[in-house]
Amino acid sequence: VVRLARIGRILRLIKGAKGIRTLLFALMMSLPALFNIGLLLFLVMFIYAIFGMSQFAYVKREAGIDDMFNFETFANSMICLFQITTSGGWNYLLYPSLNKEPDCDPKKVHPGSSVLG
């Protein structure tokens, strides 16, 4: 009951403040466009997650590549891409994927190369 009273007070405040009402109306009108932009961003991230899984699934785990941040599964690929998109530590994902010898050993099961992880 107390929570409903608090919500009622907030709604009365919004009714009284014309500026807040205008901002909320503008937000409600822009929601379909925001949904379309979010869907487009998800589509691009989906494509790059699949690409990352095919190219960087077997990168040696070091620096920023660990159990959670890797390209071995689709979910982990999406998490990595979100990290790259928000510019949060993308360099920790970059450096381990730049393979050099001995990590590119062709005798390994998944050797990687200087081009592929």
Image (cartoon, rainbow, N blue to C red):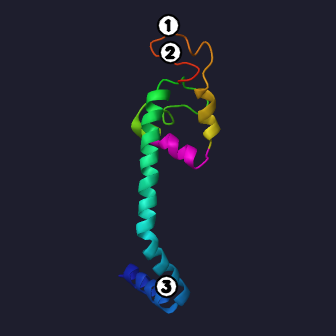
Looking at the rendered structure, the secondary structure element under dot 1 is: loop
Image coords of residue 32 (percent x, y)? 40, 68
Pick out the residue farthest to the left: 1
**Membership of 82 in magenta stretch:** yes
Determine which residue is flagged by label 1: 107
Q: Count how many numbered circles sit on residues in the image.
A: 3
Range of magenta residues: 78-88
Indicate whether residue 5 is drawn in magenta. Answer: no
Q: CA distance from mark 2 to mark 3?
A: 59 Å
* Quarter assignment of residue 34: bottom left
The N terminus: image quadrant = bottom left
Crowd tier of the residue under label 1, counting other residues whose Cα lies within 10 Å: few below 14, some 14–19, many 20 or above = few
Residue at image mark 3: 21
Under mark 3, the amino acid is Arg
**Considering only order in the chain, which callout, 3 or 2, is on the residue closer to the N terminus?**
3
In the shown orientation, is residue 69 left or right of residue 1? right
Q: Are marks 2 and 3 in contact (CB under 8 Å)?
A: no
Residue plotted at (49% across, 78% down): 26
Q: Position of residue 5 (x, y in %)?
A: 40, 85
